[in-house]
Amino acid sequence: MPNTPRKILITGATGFIGKYIVEHALKNGYEVYLAVRDKSDFSRIADLDFKKIIVDFSSEESIANSFSSNVVFDTVVHSAGVKSCFVTNDYYTYNVALTKNLCEVLHKRKLLKGKFIYMGSLAALGPGNKVSLADITENKVANPISDYGKSKLLAEKEVVRSGLSYTILRPTAVYGKGTSDYNALVKIVKKGFAVYITKPSQRLSFVHAEDVARVVFLTDKVSQGNQIFNVSDGVDYTLASIYEIMASALKVKLMLKLRIPFFLVLAVAQYNHYIERFFKIENALNSFEKANEVTAPNWKCSSKKLKDRLGFKTLHTLREIID
């Protein structure tokens, strides 16, 4: 009698990182179920093999009504959420309340046999010490400085108290095919410019979306007990070195290096805030707190725990950020 494939439920599958998670779930032989909204855009994953479960995520009751008690999952990967909102409360609605309600349904109805893997964010911990420039480890006292980071931290707490067996992943800045987050930066470098909105010595960390997906299934197979892992490629970058890496990958020479004063960064953030509110045009730099977050001197993320306990090694390099 053939082995029955393990069943996995994935939320956020139509997003940037979600596509990689679905691809790796299939590579690992899972029977893939996607919890999706009725009007989700499946263009990223249209050629992949999965079963859709249309879910109304607005409440615990509506989520419960979307699931059949005949399907029990071996693994759930919760990647759904928001990172930029026009309305501040939406961070807490879609990152915190949604996570809480999903966990409640899975636990109360016994729909999960194995792990609940939550896709968190390094923003939940907040930036590292700006004086010592010490690595941000899993043991850092959480001090998020944006509503996004605060909401991701609160969502983590909901997972911890859910009663489910869990793994929480905190990726640092993620790059790879399918995101437009770095397009503006690439355009600047192509023109031979390096524009600094903070000191060139700012410490940063990155990880490719495929490596994040690989961590998901590595933790599902290997990790024992409830765990939290920071996720990065383990390289300590400075803002200046990132420009040099991109320039090298694009085969251009940086001809002009320009530093923008912080008060101008704040002014741009405030301008973007009003543009976003009135015209519904999303912008990553859309508030004073976001300006403080992106200019923080230390976002150096340690992946030592991940490497030591699970033997994780990245397959991608930051040169691929130009894709």
Image (tube, grey):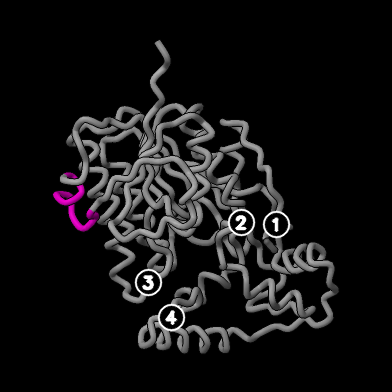
* Rendered image quadrant of residue 40: bottom left
Mark 4: amino acid: Ile
Which residue occupies the foreground of this view, 225 or 60?
60
Query: Regarding mark 1 in the picture, which secondary structure is present there?
Result: helix
Q: Is residue 58 magenta?
A: yes
Q: State how far apart marks 2 and 4 are (Cα).
A: 23 Å
Q: Does 279 sit left or right of 126 as displayed?
A: left
What's the distance in space between the residues labelled 1 and 4, CA to CA? 27 Å
Residue drawn at the location 42% of the way across and 14% of the way down: 2
Check disc 3 and report its element: helix, strand or loop. loop
Please state which amino acid type lies under the numbered disc 1. Answer: Glu
In terms of depth relative to the viewer, which is nearer, 245 or 20?
20
Secondary structure type for disc 2:
loop
The answer to whether residue 105 is left or right of residue 21 is left
- The image position of residue 127, as x and y in percent, is 53, 61
Q: Are marks 1 and 4 in contact (CB under 8 Å)?
A: no
